[in-house]
Amino acid sequence: MAKLYTVDAAEQLSIDQVQNLYRKYVNKSQVSLMTSFGFGRELADHAQGAYIHTRDGRAILDFTGGVGVLSHGHNHPRILAARQRFQARQRMEVHKTYFSPYLAALSHNLAEVLPGDLDMSFLPNSGAEAVEGAVKLAYKYHGGRRNTILRSDISFHGKLLGSGSLTGSAQNHFAFPGIPGVVSFGYDDLASVRAAVDASRDRRGRSDVYALLIEPFSASTMRWCSEEFLRGVRELCTREEIVLIFDEIYTGWGKTGSMFYFMRYPGLIPDVVTTSKSFGGGKSSISAYVARRPIFHKAYESFNDALLQSTSTTYYGFGEETATAIEAINVAVEEDFPARARDIERILAPGLARIAKEHPDAVSEVRGAGALWGVFLNAPRALDAVAKLAPAGLARDPQFGTKLVTCAVVNALYRDHDIYTYYTLNGKNPLVVGPPLVVDPVDVERFVDRLDQTLAQGLPRLVSRFVKEKVSSLW
């Protein structure tokens, strides 16, 4: 008979037991990577709001925001209550031949929040699926007669074969097969978009581009598109009948100070917008692509095509997931998440600017919006010698020094100040400052003060400590 763990038994596992199970059944390299930091060496007990509480009694201020998932914070009471009501009433979770009142209401809510005729929704599970669903919709809209899709050179849209091939980042160091006809343009460079469209024309001047995919705010690089660029792309796509897709998977639901980043520009409406992460309230794995009615109608609203829109056959629009997202949207609207993000910005923007000014050797730049900021750290020249000692793959990475420095700061904030941060693997690898939108302003001020204290130690000292800890953990 199989020897199986129960849920209770799983909750009693020690950190050593968990790591050993990861090594045997998940990925041993993940253990090596995560134990580079303090948070890889202990287990969380519970979490609430902006805090994670570990088994040994530490209260960790979570400034990762769950990498975009936790705008509502950990275990928001209204989100928990909605899920508990669903369970207590024994609602039916899934059966595709019954209509779902939750799916219907959630689709309505999305149309109410989004501008223009962004009315038609589909609800898969992950951001990558939402992107692929949006691209599939665009291809179907053109009836397969166009074969080129444009994406920016710094994009991040997911890691599935399709969405991964639409991702233009340093994370794509292995060439998987992907969607054919992918062409890059320069981020926020309207001239390069026009050039890419012109290059796709046939002898009669007809465009071969069926979709243009862009993140209005690139959370992995802390760059954003100008209003001029976004409006120019909208005009170009309208003229050439290219389906314009805005990826707001990370930045939706108030994170940058407007409900969606593109909504700060009145009258600017994409043909499709994708969302995920905080859309699920921090508890539900759900995403959406929302399309303009005419685009969706032409692609899928016929008897023969009505079931072609799905990105998966079984898992979309589950009852508890959609009930959770209904409550998540209501919380974001009623608690005015965009205003909360702007309040956080009023602390972070001057605080981080002051840190950059006071630590010019450590910080090259800070930039961001709302509750999403990047701190770009300098790699001291002394690290060149360290890089030469690194394994071959790391030694060839031009960003190795920056990554090492940023990891050292992440480690120090966690170990010394009980503050949890992370850095992106795209662009110039900034330290990400992205707290939940429910964070107390006092905690935002605390973060700025502790980051200042950490950088005051000097980057060489922080790196030396980090490397020593890493080496000692291997023995």
Image (cartoon, rainbow, N blue to C red):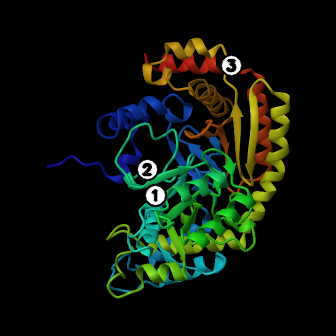
Q: Residue at x 38, y 87 (%)?
A: 302
Question: The residue under label 3 is which amino acid type?
Answer: Pro
Point out the tag, 3 or 2, that comes first from the N-terminus: 2
Using the rendered view, name the quadrant where residue 248 is placed: bottom right
- Pick the residue in front: 328 or 384: 384
Label ID, residue 128: 1
Identify residue for label 2.
Answer: 164
Q: Distance between the Cα atoms at labels 1 and 2?
A: 8 Å
Give percent across and percent down for residue 245: 55, 65
Where, by quadrant of the figure, is residue 76 drawn?
bottom right
Q: Residue at x 59, y 25 (%)?
A: 404
Q: Residues within 10 Å of mark 3 (few under 14, many from 20)?
A: some
315 vs 300: above or below: above
Res 313 quadrant in image: bottom left
In this rendering, position of residue 444 left or right of residue 315: right
Disc 3 designates what residue? 380
